[in-house]
Image (cartoon, helix red, strand yellow):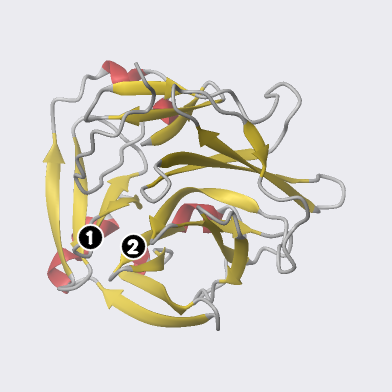
């Protein structure tokens, strides 16, 4: 797993208990904007790569600027940041990246928002370092920051899928957009409506998607975390939802800055990959 703490990216392997702190991609004292990191291990080249995206919206002109770097982890824990490209790709649009991404078949996907407030699917090929962008056909257009909060990426049926939960709380509805053909920018859509007997699950609490599983389940976490809390497990195939009670979390985790507490759920995938030679 990859996360950032005190403006430094960190990689942690739960199986080996190894924690590796990378140098920041940019000077945190001079770089302004939204910084997002995306991590993946390439089994073909046996390399760990971290992609850093920095996007900023200029206050006076509302212009969006972005730049991107890649870190290739070398044996022994070394490595350095380098620019992801010399010249921007032909279809590249400066964007502000949203946190949270998925990797499918050697490609990292994440969502980005342009100066025109368009939602774009950004893809980064791990080995070739190619960037591509595809506009996402959302069912409804909402101004930021509502988009950042209500839209996320998951892997669904082996495809990168955009989940729009804008209408989950009021209408009990989820809209899914799956990328069927990246070359021709073809999407398929699916609308799920929560069963009437389970509407109270989503109407009383505001949730966000914070994880997915390979068998088509997404996990929704309350935006306002207090102990104890409940997690919703939504099966996209059967359109069935269950509640899970989370108890025993120390109260002091929530007593200070709640922004430091974040919950993610994912499939268990044991790996003994070493982050560095010891």
Q: Measuring 38% from the left and 73% from the top, which residue is drawn there?
A: 175
The residue beneath circle 1 is 214
Q: Measuring 35% from the left and 38% from the top, which residue is drawn there?
A: 224
Q: Measuring 13% from the left and 46% from the top, which residue is drawn there?
A: 244
Along the line of sight, the residue nearer the viewer: 108 or 119: 108
Furthest toward the right, the residue is 60
From the image, which quarter does the N terminus lie in? Answer: top left
Residue 99 image offset from top left, x and y in percent: 49, 46
* Residue 254 in view, yes or no: no
| Mark positioned earlier in the residue sequence (1 or 2) | 2
The reply to whether discs 1 and 2 touch (Cβ–Cβ < 8 Å) is: yes
* Residue 84 in view, yes or no: yes
Q: Is residue 83 above or below residue 151?
A: above
Q: Secondary structure at mark 2?
A: strand
Left or right placement of residue 160 versus residue 27 in this view: left
Q: Is residue 39 above or below residue 232?
A: above
Location of residue 71 (image quadrant):
top right
The residue beneath circle 2 is 155
Residue 135 image offset from top left, x and y in percent: 59, 72
Q: Secondary structure at mark 1?
A: loop
Location of residue 23 (image quadrant):
top right
């Amino acid at each position: 797993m990859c996360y950032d703490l005190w403006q430094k990216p960190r990689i942690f392997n739960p199986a080996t208990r190894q924690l590796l702190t990378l140098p920041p991609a940019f000077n945190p004292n001079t770089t302004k904007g939204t910084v997002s990191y995306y991590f993946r291990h390439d089994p073909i080249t046996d390399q760990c790569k971290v992609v850093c995206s920095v996007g900023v919206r200029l206050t006076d002109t509302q212009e969006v600027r972005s730049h991107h770097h890649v870190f290739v982890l070398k044996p022994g824990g070394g490595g350095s940041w380098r620019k992801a490209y010399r010249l921007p790709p032909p279809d590249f649009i400066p964007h502000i990246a949203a946190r949270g991404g998925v990797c499918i078949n050697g490609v990292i996907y994440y969502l980005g928002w342009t100066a025109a407030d368009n939602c774009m699917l950004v893809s980064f090929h791990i080995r070739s370092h190619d960037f591509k962008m595809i506009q996402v056909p959302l069912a409804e257009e909402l101004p930021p920051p509502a988009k950042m909060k209500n839209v996320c990426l998951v892997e669904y049926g082996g495809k990168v899928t955009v989940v729009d939960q804008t209408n989950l709380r009021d209408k009990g509805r989820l809209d899914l957009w799956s990328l069927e053909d990246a070359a021709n920018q073809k999407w398929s859509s699916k609308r799920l409506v929560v069963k009437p007997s389970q509407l109270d699950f989503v109407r009383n609490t505001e949730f966000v998607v914070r994880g997915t599983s390979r068998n088509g389940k997404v996990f929704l976490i309350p935006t306002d975390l207090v102990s104890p809390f409940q997690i919703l497990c939504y099966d996209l195939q059967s359109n069935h939802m269950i509640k899970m009670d989370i108890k025993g979390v120390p109260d002091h985790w929530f007593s200070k800055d709640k922004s430091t507490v974040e919950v993610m759920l994912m499939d268990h995938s044991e790996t003994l990959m070493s982050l560095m030679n010891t």
